[in-house]
Amino acid sequence: MSERRAAFRLGQRAILHSLPGSAAWGVVSGVAMVKGGLAVPWAIMMSLLVYAGSAQLAALPLIVAGAPLWVIVATGLITNLRFVIYSAALRPFFVNESTGKRAALGFFMTDFTFTVFMRAAQDGSLPARDQDAWFAGVCTNNWLTWQVCAISGIVAASYVPTQWGLEFTGTLALVALVGPSLNARPALIGGVIAGVIALLAHGLPFKLGLFCAALAGITAATLTDGWQQRPPAAAGA
Amino acid sequence: MNEPVAGIALAVVIVGLALSTFVTRTSFLLAGARLSLGARIEVALRYAPVCTLAAIIVPDVLMHGPHTGVDFSPLNPRLIGVLGAALWLCWSRNILGCLALGMGAYSLARLYL
């Protein structure tokens, strides 16, 4: 028991250096929710239940524009698809845990906690035993930080005049998320194509332009990735 | 312009989004060996978020405001704000600096242009 507690404590300490980033994200998503037009109770409910900043920020403009429900949920789902890959990467570490524990660890896994876990697994600082307790420690600190900051942002934002234009912080946060990944050529090509098609298809009903744009971008990025992987000599074969 | 989603419909959206988070995050952890990804699908999943977010950001920056159509003007405050944020991201990953510079440029452009 005390060994598990020690692992939990170590996990709590391992995420400390990521917490400022998590806190900033939390505040921004909270502020953007309210300034984008959600009432305070709804924003708090969304933060607690959804707990995914990028999906929340992606869904927000669609909620405000009154898009069909399935379009809003599907947009959140595509934004969350990266978690499927994270989940596959985490699986070998938790294969022997109970279903309930795997579900809980999965729900609390985010970009930040996944990165901390995989980095520790690579550099050998992950304990050999009680890895679930270690990861629970990581996730607990991250969840507390994010929720406290998001709810503070939600409450504080309702006192800030709308003229300050704080809803734009949501767009900027998405830029900060996307920017670094544009380093890779397939992502850059996919992003540019998605952006251009989003402009061209903006007039489509039900905000379907967003889908066409995302699908076109994903297709372009996947094809580019395939061409890059193929060795040049085999390209003509 | 439609009315914003509200009331029961908003509750349904929030529950749907929560489910989308839960299903994606727990997918392999719960289904395990019964799920398998083809190499192509895995690549597509990897690029899905970037492309979706780009499709959200670009119209949000270039088609904002009362006028219809694309606003490529160098006086568009949102464009100026995003350029400021992008400039910051070229040499630092720090999100606070990115937000500060982006909001600063956006606010100055709105006040003085």
Image: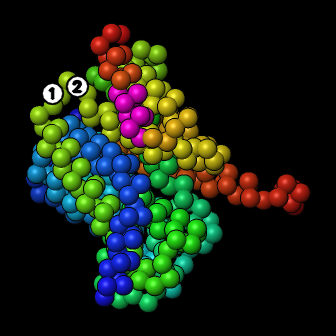
Labels 2 and 1 positioned on one and the same chain? yes
Q: Quadrant of residue A113?
A: bottom left
Q: In the image, residue A190 lies at what x, y percent?
A: 57, 46
Viewer-proximal residue among A38 and A195: A38
Q: Is A226 included in the stretch rendered in magenta?
A: no
Number of other residues with Cα within 10 Å of mark 2, as a class: few under 14, some 14 to 19, many 20 or more: few
Predominant SS of the magenta segment: helix
Which amino acid lies under the numbered mark 1 shown in the image of this protein? Pro
Q: Chain of mark 2?
A: A
Please tell me whether mark 2 sits on a helix, a strand or a loop. helix
Q: Is residue B102 magenta?
A: yes
Residue A60 visible in the snapshot: no
Checking the image for residue A164, the label placed there is 2
Q: Relative to residue B9, is residue A64 depicted above or below? A: above
Dot 1 surroundings within 10 Å: few (below 14), some, or many (20 or more)? few
Q: Which residues are magenta?
A: B95-103
> Residue at 35% of width from left, 27% of height from top?
B103
**Residue A111 x %, y %:** 43, 59
- Disc 2 residue type? Trp
Could you tell me which quadrant the C terminus of chain A lies in?
bottom right
Q: Which mark is residue A161?
A: 1
Give the x, y percent position of residue A65: 25, 40
User: Callout 1: residue from which chain?
Assistant: A
Name above or below for residue B4 compared with residue B112: below
Which residue is painted at 50% across and 55% down in the image? B48
Between residue B65 and residue A15, name the one nearer to us: A15
- Which residue lies at the image location 44% right of the left edge and 90% below the top edge? A96
Residues at marks 2 and 1, CA–CA distance in whole angstroms: 6 Å
* Nearer the observer, A197 or A127: A127
**Does the CB distance between marks 2 and 1 fall below 8 Å?**
yes
Q: Label for residue B34?
A: none
Residue A62's quadrant in the figure? Answer: top left
